[in-house]
């Protein structure tokens, strides 16, 4: 028997083994020169394969342990070397994050997708270098949420290496200094929450993040101008309580005054602070040395007088042209017992440069079109409603308007009609290629189906270019704002949430039942379309106005047909499931709710169900059992298989049972307190 270290092993074979295992070959072995050839299986000793497999397995294990060690180091810095509050929750060197299901970690196929550690009172540092410099972790991590702790930042500029992040949520901490410019390199980012910190300096060029949908930076110390975001893509935006200065970007009026409050040097709509215009700053220029100041002022007066005369002449010509056009198109009114007819050949309304500003700064009307009174009155179809008695399209033209929001399918304006003594919300629909005849039929059919928790249209307009819907204005905003916005003075406890869920479910059951044969589902159900009346009761708005194509769930609908298939009603079920998840988790839906649904399903699969719930609910002592029951309902609703989703009537029954159980529990608790 020849000892191993004396055997003549071909150098090429050992070299190949070394390349595979990344190990240094033992120098005591003797390597005679040879030429590497493709050996047959019989030529390679069995021990070579065994050693190779053994070394490969050990190398893989080392990689997994390295992966674990990175997260342990990350936690050590995060908790200021005090470790995770509860050692039973993982994050130790003797366990693995995915296999042993560390708390706050959600994996998919042994890859870390979500790190959610909100409200654990950490006081250490978020070290982006530790977390994002391991390539395999940086390429898999999609959500990093560390809200409501007490942590600081360290090497935060290296957060750009976590290039797949879609959500970076670090609000409610102690981050100091400037926000690193590298954050703008997170091209996949959809939600950025840096609110309630101590960030200072100007904001970096965040508009470079083209898909950003949520930006919250309130309660910091930022200075300088607000970057010109693509506000049409943002669903939530807040920069209040900072030191921003200058004029709010033109498209910034997409959001209300609460998004900009307490920035003393900020001006422009929707704030009441007016910005100084260039003309105002130059109204008294210094006179040249060789010319008296009075002469300069006289020249300016003459110049501006000329401008005014030219403007009046142009305005006169426009009015004359409109008058002649109105005379040519004057037609006989067509009326019935409820509505006035729409004529596509009439003047089509078009919105002016929609600088519809709040606070009385600008009282620009919805349109600048002027037309014969009889024609304008006939163009608006007013449904029977005593609240808007005598409403005419002319009244909408003259009324001051304020832009409330802009979405993928149109814009919404708040219109104050003084003559009727009411405030209305006007929805302008775009990109819906439906004929005026079909649109009119649909609106009349929807008007026949009444439910107290479905907001009815009080009037509408339709032409080839424009489709307008008029609703009663609801002053308490939307469910979206109540869950995610700034209405901190309005408690949204468990009882309120289960009431809202049950009410919306019952309302949808009613509408689906009544409109089943018409094939009219809601088509665009989301929390921003659930409005709150003066009693904080939910009202479903915009029912049946748009059938939304959804490529992710393979539902393709024709907007020219009202005979929608049953899949459209199941799409409402999916959308309702996302709303339930919003109320249970307190988190925002992104990508039509797919991100939120995927995250919840991943957490539940990892058996950390309690991690999904809104900490406000847990802090209020809500029943975990009933929250889990409602979560199971939501998960059934967001099933990827359309056929596997329950009908809306089944969903309503399940929620009603949870609510009744909750009511019985409350009655028992109240009786117990009274008998003490």
Image (tube, rainbow, N blue to C red):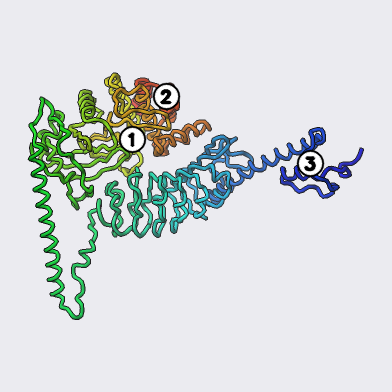
Q: Which residue is mark 1?
A: 527
Say if mark 3 contacts mark 1, CB within 8 Å. Answer: no
Q: Residue at x 50, y 44 (%)?
A: 164
Number of numbered discs on residues:
3
**Seen in the image, is 639 located left or right of residue 11?**
left
Residue 209: x and y in percent read: 42, 49
Question: Of the numbered discs in the image, which one, if any, rests on residue 27?
Answer: none
Q: Earlier in the sequence, mark 3 or mark 1?
A: 3
Q: Earlier in the sequence, mark 1 or mark 2?
A: 1
Question: Of the numbered discs in the image, which one, if any, rests on residue 642?
Answer: 2
* Vertical position of residue 244 compared to residue 565: above or below: below
Residue 379: x and y in percent read: 14, 35
Quarter of the figure with the N terminus? top right
Q: Earlier in the sequence, mark 2 or mark 3?
A: 3
Q: Residue furthest bottom?
A: 290
Q: CA distance from mark 1 to mark 2?
A: 21 Å
Q: Quadrant of residue 6?
A: top right
Q: Secondary structure at mark 2?
A: loop
Residue 619: x and y in percent read: 41, 38
Q: Nearer the viewer, mark 3 or mark 1?
A: 3
Q: Secondary structure at mark 3?
A: loop
Q: CA distance from mark 3 to mark 1?
A: 67 Å
Residue 675 visible (yes or no): no
Residue 20 visible (yes or no): yes
Q: Secondary structure at mark 1?
A: helix
Residue 570: x and y in percent read: 37, 24
Q: Quadrant of residue 639?
A: top left
**Crowd band around label 3 with a 10 angstrom C-alpha radius: few (<14), some (14–19), many (20+):** few
Q: Which residue is mark 3?
A: 37
Quarter of the figure with the C terminus? top left
**Seen in the image, is 395 located left or right of residue 75?**
left
Q: CA distance from mark 2 to mark 3?
A: 57 Å
């Amino acid at each position: 028997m020849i000892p191993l270290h004396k055997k003549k092993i071909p150098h090429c074979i050992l070299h190949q083994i070394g390349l595979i295992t990344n190990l240094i070959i033992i120098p005591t072995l003797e390597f005679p020169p040879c030429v590497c050839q493709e050996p047959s299986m019989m030529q390679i000793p069995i021990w070579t394969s065994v050693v190779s497999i053994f070394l490969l397995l050990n190398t893989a294990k080392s990689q997994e342990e390295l992966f674990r060690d990175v997260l342990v180091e990350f936690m050590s810095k995060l908790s200021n070397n005090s470790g995770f509050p509860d050692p039973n929750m993982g994050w130790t060197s003797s366990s693995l994050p995915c296999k042993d299901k560390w708390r706050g970690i959600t994996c998919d196929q042994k890859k870390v997708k979500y790190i959610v550690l909100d409200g654990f009172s950490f006081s250490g540092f978020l070290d982006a270098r530790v977390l994002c410099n391991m390539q395999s972790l940086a390429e898999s991590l999609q959500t990093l949420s560390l809200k409501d702790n007490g942590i600081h930042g360290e090497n935060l500029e290296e957060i750009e290496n976590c290039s797949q992040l879609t959500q970076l949520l670090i609000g409610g901490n102690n981050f100091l200094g400037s926000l690193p410019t590298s954050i703008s390199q997170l091209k996949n980012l959809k939600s950025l929450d840096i609110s309630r910190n101590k960030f200072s300096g100007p904001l970096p060029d965040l508009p470079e993040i083209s898909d950003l949908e949520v930006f919250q930076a309130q309660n910091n110390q930022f200075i300088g101008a607000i970057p010109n975001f693509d506000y049409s893509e943002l669903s939530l935006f807040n920069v209040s309580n900072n030191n921003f200065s200058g004029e709010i970007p033109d498209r910034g009026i997409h959001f209300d005054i609460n998004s900009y409050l307490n920035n003393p040097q900020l001006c422009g709509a929707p704030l009441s602070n007016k910005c100084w215009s260039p003309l105002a700053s130059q109204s008294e220029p210094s006179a040249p040395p060789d010319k008296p100041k009075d002469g300069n002022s006289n020249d300016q007066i003459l110049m501006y007088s000329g401008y005014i005369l030219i403007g009046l002449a142009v305005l006169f010509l426009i009015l004359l042209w409109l008058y002649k056009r109105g005379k040519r198109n004057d037609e006989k009114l067509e009326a019935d017992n409820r509505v006035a007819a729409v004529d596509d050949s009439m003047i089509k309304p078009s919105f002016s440069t929609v600088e519809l500003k709040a606070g009385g700064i600008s009282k620009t009307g919805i349109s600048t079109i002027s037309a014969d009174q009889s024609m304008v009155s006939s163009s608006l179809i007013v449904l029977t409603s005593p609240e808007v008695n005598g409403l005419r399209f002319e009244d909408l033209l003259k009324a001051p308007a304020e832009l409330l929001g802009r979405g993928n399918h149109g814009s919404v304006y708040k219109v104050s009609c003084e003559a009727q003594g009411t405030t209305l919300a006007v929805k302008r629909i775009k990109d819906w290629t439906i004929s005026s005849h079909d649109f009119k039929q649909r609106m009349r059919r929807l008007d026949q189906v009444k439910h107290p928790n479905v907001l009815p249209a009080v009037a509408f307009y339709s032409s080839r270019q424009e489709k307008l819907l008029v609703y009663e204005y609801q002053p308490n905003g939307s469910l979206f704002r109540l869950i995610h916005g700034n209405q901190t003075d309005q408690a949204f406890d468990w009882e309120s949430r289960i009431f809202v869920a049950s009410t919306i479910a019952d309302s949808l059951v009613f509408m689906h039942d009544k409109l089943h044969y018409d094939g009219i589902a809601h088509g665009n159900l989301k929390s921003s379309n659930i409005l709150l009346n003066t009693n904080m009761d939910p009202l479903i708005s915009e029912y049946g106005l748009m059938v939304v194509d959804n490529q992710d769930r393979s539902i393709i609908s024709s907007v020219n047909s009202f005979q929608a298939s049953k899949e459209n009603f199941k799409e409402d079920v999916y959308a309702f499931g996302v709303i339930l998840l919003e109320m249970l988790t307190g988190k925002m839906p992104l990508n039509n709710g797919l991100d939120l649904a995927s995250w919840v399903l991943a957490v539940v699969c990892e058996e950390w169900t309690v991690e999904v719930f809104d900490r406000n609910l847990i802090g209020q002592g809500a029943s975990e059992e009933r929250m889990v029951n409602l979560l199971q309902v939501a998960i059934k609703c967001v099933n990827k298989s359309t056929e596997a989703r329950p009908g809306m009537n089944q969903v309503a029954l399940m929620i009603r049972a949870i609510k009744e159980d909750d009511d019985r529990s409350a009655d028992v608790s109240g009786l117990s307190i009274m008998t003490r």
